[in-house]
Image (cartoon, rainbow, N blue to C red):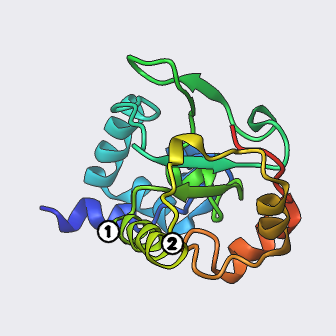
Amino acid sequence: PYSGPDRISKMIPLGWQGHAMTIDRALEQSPELKIAYTIENETKRLLDLARKVEGVVRHASVHAAGVVIADKPLTEYVPLQREPNGEKIITQYDMYTVGEDGVGLLKIDFLGLRNLTIIQEALRFIRENQGMTVDFSKVSFDDPKTYELLASGETTGIFQLESAGMRRYIKELKPTAIF
């Protein structure tokens, strides 16, 4: 039944900063789990079976529009690889480990539906009020004023960067380029 494995999984502590929790480490850190493993045959059987598949990756997945930003080369923080069936460079950490609660890097989702709506409305507003049509294929990624604005933490309205934590990180990172 679901309740048995669910009870056991809740006894396993969380990993930290890119370090996944292992069954052996969990048994060391959780006295409750250690007791269950020692006296409950079903718990011992389940954890012994889990050890056999522990660390085996189910699949590699890539966020369609996820971007990770750091103040130094990413190789100083995370292992990198080429995406499966592609040429793009991706992190080997999952989205949770690479972000604020893990390694602490800035990750941005450019495909959020709310973001697309905001971009569409901003383009319409610019066209109607300034008489300009913005062509994103011709936008420079080397605009110093943009990076100054980001580094100042004035990011309200950019949902990926408007929380207090993200504003603090962007001020610390002081980005000067997008790759």
The reply to whether residue 133 is in sight is yes
Q: What residue is at 78 percent from the left and 45 percent from the top?
A: 142
**Secondary structure state at the residue bearing disc 1:** helix
Q: How many marks?
A: 2
**Secondary structure state at the residue bearing disc 2:** helix
Neighbourhood count class around disc 2 (C-alpha, 10 Å): few under 14, some 14–19, many 20 upward: few
Residue 94 vs residue 41, the one in the foreground: 94
For this view, does 49 lie left or right of residue 170?
left
Q: Which of the image's four quarters has the N terminus?
A: bottom left
Q: Which residue is tagged 2?
A: 126
What number is the disc on residue 116?
none
Q: What residue is at 27 percent from the left and 59 percent from the top?
A: 5
What number is the disc on residue 7?
1
Q: Is residue 87 above or below residue 153?
A: above
Tell me residue 54's x, y (percent).
Answer: 43, 35
Which of the 4 image quadrants contains residue 92?
A: top right
Q: Is residue 120 above or below residue 74?
A: below
Which of the 4 image quadrants contains residue 38?
A: bottom left
**Residue furthest toward the front?**
131
Q: What residue is at 80 percent from the left and 59 percent from the top?
A: 147
For this view, does 33 lie left or right of residue 160?
left
Under mark 1, the amino acid is: Arg
For this view, does 148 lie left or right of residue 84?
right
Residue 63 vs residue 60, the one in the foreground: 63
Tell me residue 127's x, y (percent).
Answer: 46, 69
Neighbourhood count class around disc 1 (C-alpha, 10 Å): few under 14, some 14–19, many 20 upward: few
- In three-dimensional space, the C-alpha distance between marks 2 and 1, rounded to whole angstroms, equals 55 Å
Under mark 2, the amino acid is: Ile
